[in-house]
Amino acid sequence: MTENTKHAMSRAEFIALIAMMFATVAFSIDAMLPALPEIGQTLSPDNVNRAQLVIAAFALGMGIGTFFTGPLSDAFGRKNVIFAAALLYIGAAVTAWASSSVEMLLLSRVVMGLGAAGPRVVALAIVRDLYSGREMAKMMSIAMMIFTLVPAIAPMLGAGIIFLTSWRAIFLAFALFALIIILWMGLRLPEPLAVDNRRPFRLPQLMAALVEMIQHPTVRLSMLVQCLCLAMLFCMITLVQPIYDVVFDRAESFPFWFGFIALMSGTGSLINASVVVRLGMRRMVTWALCGQIGLSALMLLLESLHLPNDTMFGLFVAWQTSVFFMAGLTLGNLNAMAMEPMGHIAGMAASIVGGVSTIFAAAAAATVGLLFDGSIAPLTGAILLMVALAFLIMLHMARVEMRHPAE
């Protein structure tokens, strides 16, 4: 880190701030899950399923915003873009709180997604500004642990807010969360991108940066694998509540099971942070994917045996934990692998990686969600297919790096 950053913030405080920025997305999605039934009954009683679009609308806005926030931070500085994005997020959250129609709520959620893209993407660029190599992967793994741990708190927090007030107050909690981020960052973090290192926000330069990323084999393949890994996580998050409700009749206890599983699976990021410097990022990702292939195949087989409901529930909980655990072992490493060669265009690289993976994951989750038939087979089959493809891509990456070690 730079001398100014060292003086202003300890490493632990820096990780906590970056983790909170990463957590904006998970908090904005997972805290809404318990509120969906009441939102449907309040704003769309004739078609309560429209409430599910609250998640998709946010993902859409985030995916779009992700493409722009990185390049903007390259041109105008990291902190300025986060300030602007967070203020947009806060304004949209307040609008959602006051919404009287489902259309206004969905529009507000799209804008919230645009704003949430700022902290998510620019935080990644900040880490790349100040760290590199396996040390960067370690820092990202610790921060990404919060990304996987937030679901442990968010659904219960959302349910608690609904119990004490109403679903509308959840949006005020979102606004408060973003306000804390900008105050903390504004007071404690010096601007990490010097004026001399900024790149003008011009289309030819942006297109040149995009072409450079696509042409780099490690960056290209890392992005593909990250698309698949994030899609697996989004598919699980999208379908897990209907599965608990329809398949296992455990809707009331869903927030507690979800929280427990997130806490257990959060150890994946801790393990990765402790061993990635010794084993390497690519090896960690490849091993995690290989393990998940076996677990998903086993889960698909067991589902076909029509075991007792309580037995299947226990097996599903274990498998759900493994999918979240895999995310902790892969997403931070894949981010670092894609960003490592792109330090000179970190903001643009973060935008492309985040935007492509988010839009792909959201589309995959929506598609798999439409296949839900009252069983876990569509989810397990989809995840097995995606993890097998991701594993094959990682094996190909190893061969490419052996042929072109300098790239």
Image (cartoon, helix red, strand yellow):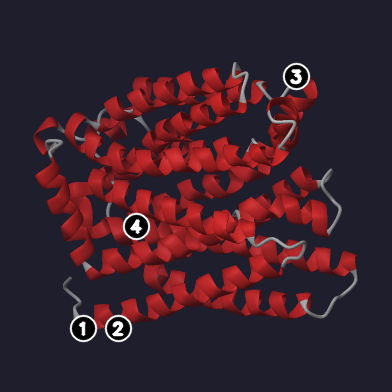
The answer to whether residue 85 is above or below residue 355 is above
Please state if 60 lies on the left or on the right of 399 as rendered: right
How far apart in space, not on screen, are marks 1 and 4 (Cα)?
21 Å
Is the Cβ of the residue at disc 1 closer than 8 Å to that at disc 2? Answer: yes
- Mark 3 vs mark 4: in front: 3
Q: x and y percent of residue 370 in the render? A: 63, 57
According to the image, label 3 marks what residue? Answer: 165
- Residue 303 placement: quadrant: bottom right
How far apart in space, not on screen, are marks 3 and 4 (Cα)?
41 Å
According to the image, label 4 marks what residue? Answer: 336
Instruction: Give the amino acid at mark 4.
Output: Ala
According to the image, label 2 marks what residue? Answer: 399
Instruction: Give the amino acid at mark 1.
Output: Arg
Name the secondary structure under disc 3. Answer: loop
Instruction: Give the amino acid at mark 2.
Output: Arg
For mark 1, does the 10 Å Cα neighbourhood hold few (<14), some (14 to 19), or many (20 or more) residues? few
How far apart in space, not on screen, are marks 1 and 2 (Cα)?
6 Å
Q: x and y percent of residue 24 in the render? A: 50, 36
Q: Report the front residue among 205 and 289.
A: 205
How far apart in space, not on screen, are marks 1 and 3 (Cα)?
60 Å
